[in-house]
Image (cartoon, helix red, strand yellow):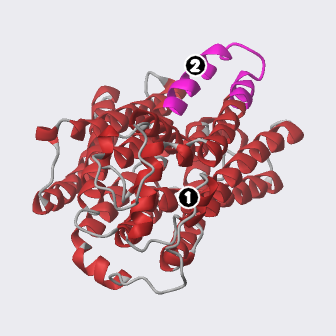
Amino acid sequence: MTNDGDPTDASIPTRIEGRFKAIVICWFLGLGNLVAWNSMLTISDYYYQVFPTYHPSRVLTLVYQPFSFGTMILLAYYEAKINTRMRILFGYTLFSLCTLALLLVDIGTSGKGGIANYIGICVLVGGFGLADAFTQGGIVGDLSFMEPIFLQSFFGGLAASGALTSGLRLVTKWAFDKADDGLRKGVILFLSISTLFEFVCVFLYAYVFGRIPIVKHFRRKAASEGSKTVASDLAAAGIHTSYDDGTVVDRLSNMTLIRQNVDLALDLWLIYALTLSIIPGFLFENTGHHQLGSWYSVVLMAHFNLWDLIGRYVPLGGCLRLESRKGLMMACLSRLLLVPCFYFTARYGEQGWMIVLVSFLGLTNGYLTVCALAVGPKGYKAPEQNALGNLLVVFLIAGIFSGVVLDWLWLINNGSF
């Protein structure tokens, strides 16, 4: 039965209607959060044809990150005062408009190169970074005071966006492989589908997610614990609370939360600094020429995204979930050994060994991400869980930013500077 009683009601959440529906929608929201950016990564083979001298995979990734990282820091600092509903809706709407604009730019310029077109694409990529900060931090904070399976489903959707875009890219590349201007036609179809996914996410969050009984239950509970960020979501669902009375919520400060969870913050930084130092620039520019030809980098990205998705669902088996904080730190540090492995495999190994390495990189990336984020919010009140979720995303994005910068170091050995 639906539980719309007192927000302090102790009913077991799994007995409230809508749990499965909420899990599915969290997955779709995760998909929409990264489908636009993963689309950019996946069509890098097209941009290397249009802009062959501009290092598209590295430059576009570098453009994306300052907007995402800088905006996320500001949003995390003012998290307790921000309307979370409007924040998330703004992010998904911006994703939708930028993806649509990317499609229109390519159609309007007939796929021509040139510095002006390249700058226009860079501006839209900056918009993706801005949107990512609004959506990812907002949703992770929002889901941190709900069931852990919701957060895991959201991160499963993030990984699924990579697997879906890679699979879709392989299909469109194959379908238009022999056609005139086939690569561009495949990209246009690809971006059209990505734009549709973004608009679906706007609809799901605006009109469906907040009205699910179990989501209302957790948000009312959060409001009873002093969280003011859920007020607009509850109002949109037809529930008005009396908790937003202008008083300051008695909660741990951001610095205290960071000090208590500095190991998890470093874990997330290490995970993504390593992954993004290899994905995507190294795969597109430093792996040499192999039998797969132009398909090689696309296949490598597909393997990474598929195993990243699998890794995020491995913790569903309770005995396979890594909950030891020391164990998480050791696992994250041990991944640094992958750097020399990729270096020597690129120079001396066959393409099969590179596929194995990329698959292992994706598997550990997804698995450790979910384990680290699932451990963090335990033992805190709702406002603190929301704040901690935002702070951990800051370190996750900082790791991505660091990895993007470190990725350029591969060019020193390549002689491309």
Q: Amino acid at mark 1?
A: Leu
What secondary structure is found at the residue carrying circle 2?
Answer: helix
Vertical position of residue 388 compared to residue 1: above or below: below
Instruction: Please indicate, yes or no, whether residue 54 appears anywhere in the rendered image.
Output: yes
Residue sitting at x 39%, y 36%: 1
Residue sitting at x 64%, y 14%: 175
CB-based contact (under 8 Å), mark 1 and mark 2: no
Which of the 4 quarters of the picture holds residue 303?
A: top left
Quarter of the rendering occupied by the C terminus: bottom right
Residue sitting at x 51%, y 61%: 138
Judge by depth and name the residue closer to the eye, 53 or 263.
263
Number of residues whose C-alpha sits closer than 10 Å to that of mark 2, classed few (under 14), some (14–19) or many (20 or more):
some
Alpha carbons under labels 1 and 2: distance apart: 42 Å
Can you identify the residue that label 1 sits on?
Answer: 234
**Image coordinates for residue 272, horizontal then vertical, percent:** 36, 57
Can you identify the residue that label 2 sits on?
Answer: 171
What secondary structure is found at the residue carrying circle 1?
Answer: helix
* 386 relative to 239 in the view: left or right: left
Instruction: Please indicate, yes or no, whether residue 287 appears anywhere in the rendered image.
Output: no
Q: Which residues are magenta?
A: 164-189
Image label count: 2
Does the magenta portion include 45? no
